[in-house]
Amino acid sequence: MRVLVPPDYRTLSRTASELVLKAMRTKRKLTLGLPTGNTPLGMYEELVRSYREQQIDFSGITTFNLDEYLGLQRNDPHSYRFYMQEHFFDHVNVPPPNVHIPEEAGRYEEQIREAGGIDLLVVGIGLNGHIAFNEPGSSFASRTREVMLAPETIANAETHFQGAPVPSRAITMGIGTILESRCIILLASGASKADIVRRALNGPVSESVPASALQTHQNVIAILDEDANPDEE
Ligand code: PGA
């Protein structure tokens, strides 16, 4: 695993965006796995800025989001589809038919296969070690499926939902699906993540820490800002 430790969140976001753009230059019809949450917001801002300023062409890209809540309306402002439109897709030229959000588990794996597999997948890490919505205890062989969210995940989502009820179920790409990506970028920012980053990257590989599965992958780049870097503590 390569570990990059940019000094701050802004540099983390730029570094992640540059890696995505570099992969796009290498392969025009790139397939991306994309995260939501607070951590990737800066990366999306940088990608949108590159599109505006340098006319980077996203028309060859196909995307698969990592997860989506169940039980929300398609246009619910708390849904990850809404988040992706608001922060990324409304501002760049990814063709809408190339955008995939796992609102139903059914054909997602097949669609990923039909797209030639995921070239580059970007993922965050939850405070409990989840990657996408693969909560502690998820099998490393798991595929895209419906899951129950962990109580701490629901509690953490309450700020984002601003008083609206947080769904208890979601659809997530599996850990097995994530591990089939050719390259994985793990993003972590802030001191609250340092402890779980340490367990995920340096602790035992265990289903009790889903992100520790990344230790078994040959091509992972972890981008940790200084606060999230356990070696800086
Ligand atoms: P965050 O979420 O980026 O909002 O911290 C990360 C995650 O739960 O995967």
Image (spheres, rainbow, N blue to C red):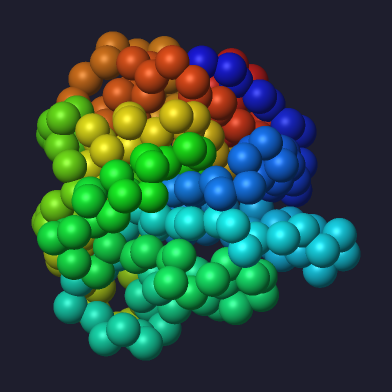
User: 61 or 53: which is nearer to us?
Assistant: 61
Name the image quarter holding the C terminus: top right
Say above or below: 34 vs 80: above
User: 119 or 164: which is nearer to us?
Assistant: 119
Quarter of the image holding residue 205? top left
Residue at point 59%, 57% (across, down): 60
Quarter of the image holding residue 113? top left
Residue at point 18%, 66% (across, down): 104
Say above or below: 216 vs 84: above
168 vs 113, left or right, is left
Say above or below: 224 vs 103: above
Residue 1: x and y in percent read: 51, 16
Q: Residue furthest right?
A: 53
* Residue 26 can be seen in this image: yes
* Residue 194 can be seen in this image: no
User: 187 or 198: which is nearer to us?
Assistant: 187
Residue at point 23%, 49% (across, down): 109
- Total numbered badges shown on the rendered structure: 0
198 vs 91, left or right, is left
Residue 103: x and y in percent read: 24, 69
35 vs 7, left or right, is left
Residue 163: x and y in percent read: 33, 82
Say above or below: 83 vs 131: below
Residue 64: x and y in percent read: 40, 55
Residue at point 54%, 71% (across, down): 95
